[in-house]
Amino acid sequence: MAGEPQGDCLFCKIVQGEVPATLVRATETTLAFRDINPQAPTHVLVIPRLHYPDAASLAAAAPSVAADVLREAGEVAADEKLDGQGYRIVFNTGAGAGQTVFHAHAHVLGGRGLNWPPG
């Protein structure tokens, strides 16, 4: 059920302290931690503590928490000194878009040129 911890979800296990992660920031509603397979010099994931399968379901069910995720993404960028040079916030939704963990999360990427389109 959305909002409830899922026993098979990697990010729920990180929230519950069952799986280690390199934490960058933590709030009452969010966690931010370094991606284990970084795609840029700075690659931090910002997740809601509550389980929602993707960003759209999070925004529909808990818009204030979705706003918290975006706010924390900006704070991560500032902490990582990316705010002056530019950074990207990415939400992948669905396997076809590259989502591999089905718990809503924002990727904060920076520290190198991020021309669009990627790849």
Image (spheres, helix red, strand yellow):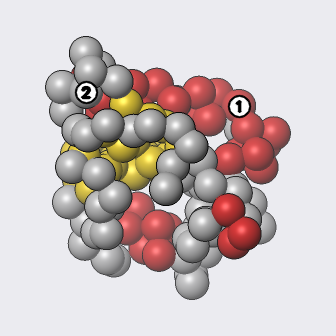
Residue shown at the point (19%, 33%) measured from the top left: 80
Query: In this view of the protein, can residue 61 be seen by the observer?
Result: yes
Q: Is residue 38 above or below residue 90?
A: below
Q: Residue furthest right?
A: 60
Q: Nearer the viewer, residue 27 or 89?
A: 89
| Three-letter amino acid code at the position of disc 2 | Leu
Q: Residue furthest bottom?
A: 8
Mark closer to the observer (1, 2): 2
| Three-letter amino acid code at the position of disc 1 | Pro
Please report contact status of discs 1 and 2: CB closer than 8 Å, yes or no.
no
Q: Is residue 94 above or below residue 41?
A: below
Q: Looking at the picture, how far across and down is residue 84, in whole percent? A: 25, 15
Crowding at mark 2 (Cα within 10 Å: few <14, some 14-19, many 20+): many
Give the alpha-carbon distance from disc 1 to disc 2, as whole Å. 26 Å
Query: In this view of the protein, can residue 16 be seen by the observer?
Result: no
Mark 1 sits on what residue?
63
- Is 43 placed left or right of 98 in the picture? left
Residue shown at the point (33%, 77%) measured from the top left: 18
Mark 2 sits on what residue?
82
Quadrant, the N terminus = bottom right
Q: Is residue 42 above or below residue 97?
A: above
Q: Nearer the viewer, residue 20 or 76?
A: 76
Q: Nearer the viewer, residue 62 or 69?
A: 69
